[in-house]
């Protein structure tokens, strides 16, 4: 049989094969430090192989290696101690799932300590059969588990960009988890929504009683009353014992410590959707209910605060996401946007979920600017900052999804390309 020309021979599984596959001309440069270490020295029996390891962990809930020091970090200094946020260290994470202890936090009145046995969810308003549900009741409903991103619409502020930013500072109010709970549609079917119903109010049990209105059709499109994240019950910071989770919409709508759902025929015009979470336009008017998270992407490695050791091979890695469904593609430029190359997307590409992208790159040692640009399945392309500013001005605090750049200086130092 003649050889199939479309079937390439698998690359040799040695280090040089790997480097050829990566398209690197300067073999050994950049990733070759292991080859320089002497083999006998590397194979000498290390101290941890000479003795028994630690017995099973105490406390029994496992922790990362003590050599791993990842942490959430406070964002801008809070005006009030309990009105604070911390960012996820996106630059040091792998894959798409955020470990629960590193999920970003945004609290407007601190983290309440809620006894799940005393927590209640009231579902009332324009419904046939109002209900008061306990956590045990909610656990008996049919459940769903879905991987979705959550992003604060105040992530990546328009004003105050700093050259010293890391990706944790610029994009850290973004995380992704597998959320488990009851579909809101299931509970609304149980209470029977009246024909004139059009909006749902969600209210939290924290000291600010955080409240938002959601159009009914949006709320019925995949919203979850979530009690678990990444396999375990919610962390207190994420809304224990119950939160609303609205896939693809600005984080603020996903009300934590959820205690009430009220069905109505119009929006409830709460503080969070009138004075806050509106977009001030250049003509002085404000847009309301702009809660969709449009397509966005960011290069997480290499990124701000890092230094490239030497010219050679690097894999550019990043994350892309969209509230409108799936990411269709990500393009990366290493030369200030003159040329763009299609990055590889790591599958499975899931709707309203983070998508990991990768592009092999050989750094020549000179100045470079790294940019990424996402396109979603509707065909929408992540805009440049200039294009966004032309429409929205610079006073709208929320929803900055502009293309974001990192400068690589000649010595390898990386900083935000403001
Ligand atoms: N009850 C309540 N829900 C809330 C908030 C809050 O302060 N109180 N913060 C909102 C905001 S602004 C965001 S971005 C997300 C943050 O969720 P996380 O802390 O789990 O990341 O929760 C939202 N839900
Ligand atoms: Mo937020």
Image (tube, helix red, strand yellow):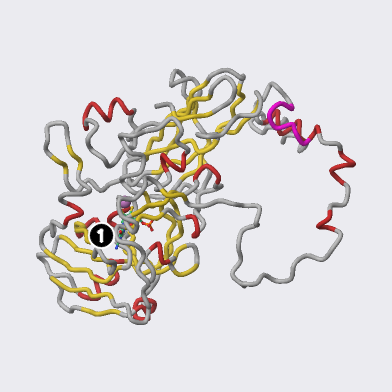
Left or right: where 113 falls relative to 197: right
| 205 drawn magenta | no
Nearer to the camera, 257 or 199: 257
Is residue 31 on the magenta stretch? yes
Residue 88 located left or right of residue 85:
right
Rate crowding at label 1 as few (under 14), some (14 to 19) or many (20 or more) other CA atoms within 10 Å: many
Q: Is mark 1 within 8 Å of ligand 1?
A: no
The residue carrying mark 1 is: 219
Q: Is residue 125 above or below residue 311?
A: below
Image quarter where the N terminus lies is: top right
Task: Tell me the quarter of the picture where residue 373 sits.
Answer: top left
State the residue at coordinates (44%, 56%).
Answer: 147
Predominant secondary structure, magenta span: loop
**341 or 315, nearer to the observer:** 315
Determine the residue positioned at 17% across, 46% down: 288
368 left or right, relative to 198: right
175 is higher (above) or lower (below) than 386 = below
In the image, what residue occupies the spot 24% across and 32% down?
394
Image position, residue 103 (x, y; %): 45, 55
Instruction: Please state, as top left, top right, bottom left or bottom right, where the C terminus lies in the image.
Output: top left
The location of residue 32, given as percent across then percent down, is 74, 31
Circle 1 SS class: helix
Q: Which residues are magenta?
A: 28-34
The spot of residue 157 in percent (x, y) is 33, 38
Q: Is residue 247 above or below residue 206?
A: above
Q: Quadrant of residue 50?
A: bottom right
| Whole-percent x, y for residue 158 in the image | 31, 35
> Which residue is at a point 40% across and 32% down the rendered structure image?
162
């Amino acid at each position: 049989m003649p050889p199939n020309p479309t079937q390439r021979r698998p690359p040799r599984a040695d280090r040089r094969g790997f480097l050829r596959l990566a398209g690197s001309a300067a073999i050994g440069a950049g990733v070759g430090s292991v080859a320089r270490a002497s083999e006998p020295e590397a194979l000498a029996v290390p101290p941890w192989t000479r003795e028994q390891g630690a017995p099973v962990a105490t406390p029994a809930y496992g922790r990362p290696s003590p050599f791993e020091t990842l942490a959430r970090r406070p964002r801008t200094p809070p005006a009030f101690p309990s009105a604070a946020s911390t960012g996820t260290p996106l630059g040091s994470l792998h894959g798409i799932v955020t470990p629960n202890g590193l999920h970003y936090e945004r609290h407007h009145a601190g983290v309440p300590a809620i006894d799940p046995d005393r927590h209640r969810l009231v579902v009332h308003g324009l419904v046939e059969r109002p209900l008061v549900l306990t956590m045990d009741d909610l656990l008996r409903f049919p459940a769903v588990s879905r991987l979705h991103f959550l992003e604060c619409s105040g992530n990546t502020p328009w004003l105050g960009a700093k050259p010293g930013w890391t990706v944790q500072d610029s994009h850290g109010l973004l995380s992704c988890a597998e959320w488990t709970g009851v579909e809101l549609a299931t509970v609304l079917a149980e209470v029977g929504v009246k024909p004139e119903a059009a909006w749902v109010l969600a209210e939290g049990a924290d000291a600010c009683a955080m409240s938002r209105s959601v159009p009914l059709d949006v709320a019925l499109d995949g919203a979850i009353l979530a009690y678990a994240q990444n396999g375990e019950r919610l962390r207190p910071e994420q809304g224990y014992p119950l939160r609303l989770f609205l896939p693809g919409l600005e984080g603020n709508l996903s009300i934590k410590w959820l205690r009430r759902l009220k069905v109505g025929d119009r929006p409830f015009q709460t503080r969070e959707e009138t004075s806050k979470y509106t977009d001030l336009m250049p003509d002085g008017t404000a847009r309301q209910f702009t809660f969709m998270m449009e397509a966005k992407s960011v290069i997480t490695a290499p990124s701000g605060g890092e230094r490239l050791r030497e010219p050679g091979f690097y894999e550019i890695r990043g994350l892309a996401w969209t509230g409108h469904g799936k990411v269709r593609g990500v393009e990366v430029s290493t030369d200030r946007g003159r040329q763009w190359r299609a990055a590889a997307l790591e599958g499975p590409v899931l709707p309203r979920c983070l998508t990991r992208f990768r592009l092999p790159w050989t750094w020549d040692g000179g100045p470079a600017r790294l940019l990424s640009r996402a396109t979603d399945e509707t065909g929408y392309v992540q805009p440049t900052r200039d294009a966004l500013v032309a429409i929205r001005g610079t006073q709208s605090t929320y929803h900055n999804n502009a293309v974001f750049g990192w400068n690589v200086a000649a010595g390898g130092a990386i900083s935000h390309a403001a």
